[in-house]
Every structure is written in C-alpha cells, then in structure tokens.
Amino acid sequence: MTRWTSQIEQITEKFLETFNGLSEEELNWKPSPGVWSIAENIVHLIQVNESYFTGFSKLKKGDYNLPFTARFGFVVRFFGNMILKSVQPENKKKVKTFPIWNPKKSTYPKSILQDFRDHQDRLKEEMNSLLDQVKENSIISSPVNRNLVYRLQTAFDIIIAHEERHYNQARELCDLLKKGK
C-alpha cells in the first residue's frame, strides 16, 4: 500500500464514519441555495476523480500525448504547486469549480455513500496501477485544461488534498445540521 492509497483509505473511512448515520434528507440538506449539500460534495469528488481516469489509462498504455508546455520543468512545477496550494484543506478561500465538475442533480439517494466507497476502491486501484509511471516522473494534464501540466505524483497529492478539503466542508455542514436540531 502506498502513502496515497493509505490516505484514500483514511479519507473514505472518515466520510463513512461521519455521514453514514445521516438520512437521505440530511445528506441533501443545504443551509442556503448557493451551498452544496454533503451529497453534492461527495458527487463532486467522484466526478473530479473520474475525470482523471482517461488520462491514467492513456499513461498506462504509453499513448499519452502531452502539450508543448510539458517540456518546461518550471511550468510543470508552477502549475502543480499552484493547483495543489489552491485545494489544500487549510485554504478557506472559496474556489468556483469548472462546470463539468458541478453536481448534475440537487438530490441524491443515501446510496451515494456506497457509490463513494466503490469509487474510492477504484481510485486506489488506479493509483496502484500507475506506480511505474510515478517512478518515471510522468507528467499529466489537468482534465479540464490540457495545458495545465504537472507530475503524476502531484496529481495524486491534488486528489487527496481536494478530498480532505471537501470532507471538511461536508463536516461543517453536518455540524450546522446538528446545531439546527
């Protein structure tokens, strides 16, 4: 088990332990219209992570075509550090997501928690299958902008930090929900 898969396992357990006791109504509760529910936070994570899978597959097959920007180490480091910093759990600044990563519905069934667990298992498999590419310092593009390039290990760090950030947001919603009762 790598540090990344270990962290994914820990995050998964935190989500399940914290939110498994909530009803479907509670998972979909929002304090105001502009705020995502716990379920929407979970769906968003699944959507973001799955958007990497096509690139992961191409990397494994050896047919990943990188843009010109990937030739410059300073560009790769700059974008990787910038994106990683923006998704850190400590960074409280709201960041608007790209439309393709917005939840498509406003309500989700309670089974979203099992969907998340299943997704996390697949994510761990994907990460484990890319360890050779990590050792080779492979570069990958952001799923939303081909010219935003960073190392594969940075992509893994971004995914994990992003999950932690949304866990914290969802936990804050859960705390608000409990205060309202």
Image: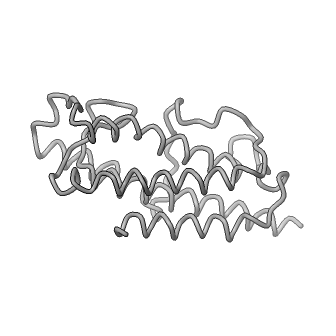
Residue under the image location 16 percent in, 36 percent down: 70
**Front one among 172 and 2:** 2
Residue furthest out toward the right: 181
Residue under the image location 50 percent in, 67 percent down: 9
Residue 32 is left or right of residue 134, and the answer is: right
Residue furthest out toward the left: 72
Quadrant location, the C terminus: bottom right
Residue under the image location 55 percent in, 50 percent down: 119
Quadrant of residue 69 within the rendered picture: top left
Q: Give coordinates of residue 74: x percent, y percent.
A: 12, 46
Instruction: Establish if 11 lies above or below 147.
Output: below
Quadrant of residue 71 within the rendered picture: top left
Quadrant of residue 144 within the rendered picture: top left
Residue 125 is left or right of residue 25, and the answer is: left
Q: Give coordinates of residue 58: x percent, y percent.
A: 30, 35
User: How many marks do you count on the picture?
Assistant: 0
Residue under the image location 70 percent in, 49 percent down: 112
Residue 41 is left or right of residue 79, and the answer is: right
Q: Give coordinates of residue 77: x percent, y percent.
A: 19, 49
Instruction: Establish if 50 lies above or below 132.
Output: above
Q: Give coordinates of residue 35: x percent, y percent.
A: 68, 46
Question: What's the coloring here?
Answer: one colour
Quadrant location, the N terminus: bottom left
